[in-house]
Amino acid sequence: MFDTFSRFFVLVTAIFFSTHTLSADLPDFTSLIKETSPAVVKINTFSETPASNPGADPSIPPYFREFFERYSRPQQRQQAGVGSGFIISEDGYVVTNHHVVDEATRIVVRLDDRREYEAVVIGTDQRSDLALLKIDEDNLPTLEFADSNLLEVGDWVVAIGSPFDLDYSASAGIVSAIGRSLPNEKGQDYVPFIQTDVAINPGNSGGPLFNLDGEVVGINSQIFTRSGGYMGLSFAVPSSVGREVIDQLKNNGQVSRGWLGVVIQDVDLNLARSFGLDKPQGALVTRVQRGGPADRAGIRSGDVILEFDGKPIEYSYDLPHVVGLVAPGSRTQARLIREMREEEIQVEVGELDQAGQTRLASIDSGTAPQGLGLSIEEANQSTLDQLELGGGVVVSSVEVGSAAAKAGLLAGDILVQIAFEQIDSRSSFDQIVSGLEPGSIVPILFYRGDTAIFRTIRVDG
């Protein structure tokens, strides 16, 4: 009996101490939340939208519709929204999301002590989803930015905001990933988002994401959801981006970004082998805008950019993240692979603007079967001019099961490069293909619509 009691006592003691040790290892967030909450704000927005006119409803009989149109006057309806933010200076500068205040006609900032202030917009930046507001007050509590580049996956982080209009709610979690690429609705991708499992919901937008020192490492911006609520994936703009954007908004009212003038894609395993790389990495340039910074620097289609401004480019989406933070007009270095050789090129970075899109024009007929399992025809000059191409041929048909089919080529694609050789015409295409070694895998560059695509093709023996 004594042995049974002893074993039970040892077991209970072990459970107690293991539980105590585990709880001791977990962070205590209470001090952090108490110290930072005064500088976190709730943002209420109001916007005016025209009310519907009953007379515009086609289901209403014409004689009633005429009455409504003559005597009813649509009244403006007010829509309300809620978000979060935080104070970064004692004289009242407030950071939030662009989408929180977009199109708002009135913005009210509320502090945790219930003071309320009308806010004015100093500037917004849709590409980073950030906005800077100003309220008329002094001696306000503030928050400090930390260096988000020091974050690691697994670090504890805390969010404070107003989810579902529930003021000053705190939630905690860990960093799930860093450098996430999330293009916005316009396909723009200039933010390497911090992914966390912190519970973020509508109303948290624009609020701070803290490290355990109570410093801001991110600005909560997005969630992934199928239900409208939190599903375990939330995303924040890193402070390394936020600080630069906020400084520009404060000083200039707008944000200027670096621009290279290239279209890029990822490098898969087959492409990596064809370029002589030991692993998939870098941003593969599929198109260079004529007269742009990359064109002036001598960057070409087919180059694989491995490093820019001293920062490694592991994935294609890393390049716009890096280039966007380089000041326009700056000179920097690009390290790249060109036809299996490493080169360094000096680039003068341009300023990002709204570049236009090109469209695919009609093609001329005339076929010529080739050994890769496809037929081609000349592209008319207007097509090449619209795509700013110096030459190319149009794929008119692809044989089922052929090398061209396995490479993903479709009728209507414009082939512009094979094995790093530029295709100027049908005759140059024939000459390049005839010189390919049977069984080799070579890169090809083609256009589908106005999108440039790199693939590899295995030359049949």
Image (cartoon, rainbow, N blue to C red):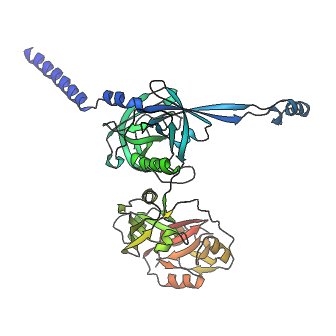
Question: Is 415 left or right of 68, judged from the image as shown?
Answer: left
Question: Is 431 left or right of 275, judged from the image as shown?
Answer: right
Instruction: Provide residue 105's location: percent of width, then percent of height.
Output: 62, 37
The residue nearer to you, when weighing 103 against 159, is 103
Residue that protrudes farthest toward the top in the picture: 1
Residue 452 against residue 141 in the figure, above or below: below
Q: Which of the image's four quarters has the N terminus?
A: top left
* Figure disc tally: 0
Name which residue lies at 44% across and 41% down. 219
Instruction: Provide residue 25's location: percent of width, then percent of height.
Output: 24, 32
Residue 321 lies in what quarter of the image? bottom left
Residue that protrudes farthest toward the left in the picture: 2
Name which residue lies at 43% across and 69% down. 347
Residue 380 shows up from this direction: no
Residue 368 against residue 258 in the figure, above or below: below
Residue 389 lies in what quarter of the image? bottom right
Residue 45 against residue 394 in the figure, above or below: above
Name which residue lies at 42% across and 39% down. 89
Residue 401 against residue 225 in the figure, above or below: below
Instruction: Provide residue 111's location: percent of width, then percent of height.
Output: 47, 28
Question: Is 429 left or right of 61, judged from the image as shown?
Answer: left
Residue 65 lies in what quarter of the image? top right
Instruction: Provide residue 128's location: percent of width, then percent of height.
Output: 49, 49
The residue nearer to you, when weighing 377 against 333, is 333
Residue 82 shows up from this direction: yes
